[in-house]
């Protein structure tokens, strides 16, 4: 026997409702169009920007060169041993998100998040093919006739083309764009290129075309994190209930015994919402702060000859102040607060630190890995030999001659496995090819009786630009191996 469902029980799973956002015009909608054009242009066009780095380095402005383990970004070239620059940029991006959230709430979600941008684009395709909200709702309910099948096929084909361009553009960040494009269409690209493009195409098609607001509401952790970061001084899109309530249509207002609020319950704010929520019910995790409901409501207020911004960007504190009869807070005052200044200060400090580190970094580098087994060898003449693998990095886009030296163990000399021991000396010269790292086996030999001690390998560039680096290591002797 089935248990009867208790009255008022809330189901654990709510079936998703289709959202058909109505077209709207207004200040924020135009801002969104402009910003969408900027973000999509950056994404699709960046791999095609060229940047001359000389004959030995790629000329793509932004390139994640996994094969050679380099990251190029205009004039900056990051090597694997400089990963702290990437870590610094990621930290800056994180703090930047905190900064934006503190200043203008979920503006990232509403304007710049890829999920929002592509969903917005796909919703525009829906309107182009199916018509505006009412036509889309009618088509959704209609049986699968020739018109519906034709429109669905056309719409999904456009989705697919956009998704493929998106997945295709992504792989261009990982190889020379014109070359990869040619190889891709001639079937000569690496299998991973086809796999990555297919995966990105599929995710864009599904997430932007069908899952849309469900990604924001159910899948993305950022709304939950942001909720914890918002306080009574954070800007959010807010319905001014003290001004709008009690709501009622113009006709109801005419017949009411007591005056009604400014909200005429026209539902335009709900109809334009890309996530399908009613902002009049208060702040919700589904609100991405896109402000399209502000445009819709302003248009209604304008037609009625009432003051705009019944729905507005406002802080909870500002609303309480306005509700009590105070003036509206200025945006500058809302944004300029201690928390914001602290985030901004930390963000700038990290940014300046990275710029300073970039400015003073050496373009040559040496690292030494000591043989651990055995830590030393006794040669036939009684001298002690320690072996090392040296890595010399030339981060310039031209070959450079470098001099390796020993700083410490004054009686020691060294030689490498590409020369006879008879030529051992305190310094060695090698030319390192442009934009490359060269590995070298080095043997350091000291006479019998030498004590164990620390020393350093040094390197200096022998050209006009110069530059030097050093790597501390240790000289082991019998009875004192570390
Ligand atoms: S658009 Fe404005 S007037 Fe219309 S229901 Fe929404 S809040 Fe009320
Ligand atoms: S409630 Fe308004 S601001 Fe929030 S997502 Fe909907 S339209 Fe955008």
Image (spheres, grey):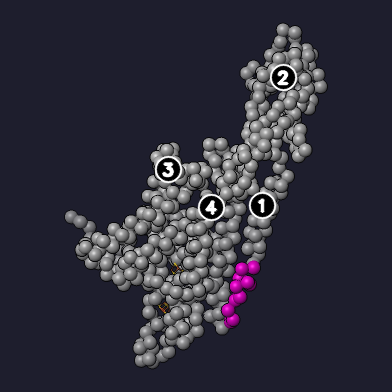
| Residue bounds of the magenta highlight | 326-336
Where 87 falls versus 95 (above or below)?
A: above
Q: Does residue 104 appear left or right of residue 9 in this picture?
A: right
> Which of the two discs, 3 and 1, labels the residue nearer the N terminus?
3
Circles 3 and 1: CB atoms closer than 8 Å: no
Q: Is residue 274 visible?
A: yes
**Residue at x 49% of width, y 81% of height:** 308
Residue beneath disc 2: 415
Residue beneath disc 1: 350
Q: Calculate the distance from the C-alpha at mark 3 to the C-alpha at mark 1.
A: 40 Å
> Which of the two discs, 2 and 1, labels the residue nearer the N terminus?
1
Residue beneath disc 3: 184
**Residue at x 49% of width, y 70% of height:** 30
**Residue 328 magenta-drawn?**
yes
Q: Quadrant of ligand 1?
A: bottom left
Residue depth check, mark 4 versus mark 2: number of the one nearer the observer: 4
Residue beneath disc 4: 46
Circles 1 and 4: CB atoms closer than 8 Å: no
**Residue at x 46% of width, y 45% of height:** 181
Decide: few, some or many residues near mark 3? Use Cα within 10 Å; few <14, some 14-19, many ≥20. some
């Amino acid at each position: 026997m089935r248990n009867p469902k208790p009255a008022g029980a809330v189901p654990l799973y709510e079936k998703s409702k289709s959202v058909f956002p109505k077209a709207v015009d207004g200040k924020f909608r135009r801002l969104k169009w402009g910003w969408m054009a900027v973000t999509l242009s950056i994404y699709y066009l960046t791999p095609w920007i060229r940047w001359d780095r000389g004959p030995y380095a790629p000329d793509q402005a932004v390139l994640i060169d996994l094969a050679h383990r380099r990251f190029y970004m205009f004039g900056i070239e990051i090597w694997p041993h400089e990963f702290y620059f990437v870590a610094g940029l990621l930290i800056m991006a994180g703090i930047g998100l905190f900064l934006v959230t503190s200043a203008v709430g979920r503006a990232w979600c509403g304007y710049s998040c890829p999920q929002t941008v592509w969903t917005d684009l796909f919703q525009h395709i829906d309107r182009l093919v199916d018509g505006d909200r009412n036509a889309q709702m009618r088509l959704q309910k209609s049986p699968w006739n020739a018109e519906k099948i034709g429109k669905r096929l056309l719409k999904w084909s456009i989705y697919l083309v956009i998704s493929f361009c998106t997945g295709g553009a992504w792989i261009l960040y990982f190889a020379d764009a014109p070359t990869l494009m040619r190889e891709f269409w001639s079937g000569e690209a690496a299998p991973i290129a086809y796999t990555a493009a297919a995966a990105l195409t599929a995710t864009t098609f599904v997430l932007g075309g069908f899952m849309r607001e469900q990604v924001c509401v159910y899948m993305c952790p950022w709304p939950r994190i942001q909720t914890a970061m918002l306080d009574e001084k954070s800007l959010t899109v807010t319905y001014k209930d003290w001004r709008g309530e009690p709501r009622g249509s113009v006709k109801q207002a005419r017949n009411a015994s007591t005056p009604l609020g400014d909200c005429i319950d026209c539902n335009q704010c709900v109809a334009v919402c890309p996530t399908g929520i009613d902002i009049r019910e208060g702040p919700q995790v589904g609100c991405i702060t896109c402000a399209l409901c502000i445009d819709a409501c302003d248009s209604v207020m304008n037609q009625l000859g009432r003051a705009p911004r019944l729905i507005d960007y406002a802080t909870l504190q500002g609303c309480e102040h306005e509700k009590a009869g105070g003036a509206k807070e200025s945006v500058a005052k809302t944004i300029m607060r201690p928390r914001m200044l602290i985030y901004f200060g930390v963000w700038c400090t990290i940014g300046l630190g990275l710029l300073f580190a970039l400015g003073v970094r050496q373009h040559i580098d040496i690292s030494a890995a000591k043989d651990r087994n055995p830590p030393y060898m006794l040669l036939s003449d009684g001298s002690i030999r320690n072996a090392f693998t040296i890595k010399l990095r030339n981060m310039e886009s031209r070959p450079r001659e470098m001099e390796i030296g020993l700083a410490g163990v004054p009686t020691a000399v060294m030689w490498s496995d590409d020369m006879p021991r008879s030529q051992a000396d305190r310094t060695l010269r090698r030319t390192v090819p442009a934009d490359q790292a060269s590995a070298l086996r080095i043997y350091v030999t000291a006479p019998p009786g030498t004590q164990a001690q620390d020393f350093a390998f040094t390197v200096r560039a022998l050209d006009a630009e110069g530059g030097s680096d050093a790597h501390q290591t240790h000289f082991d002797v019998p009875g004192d191996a570390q």
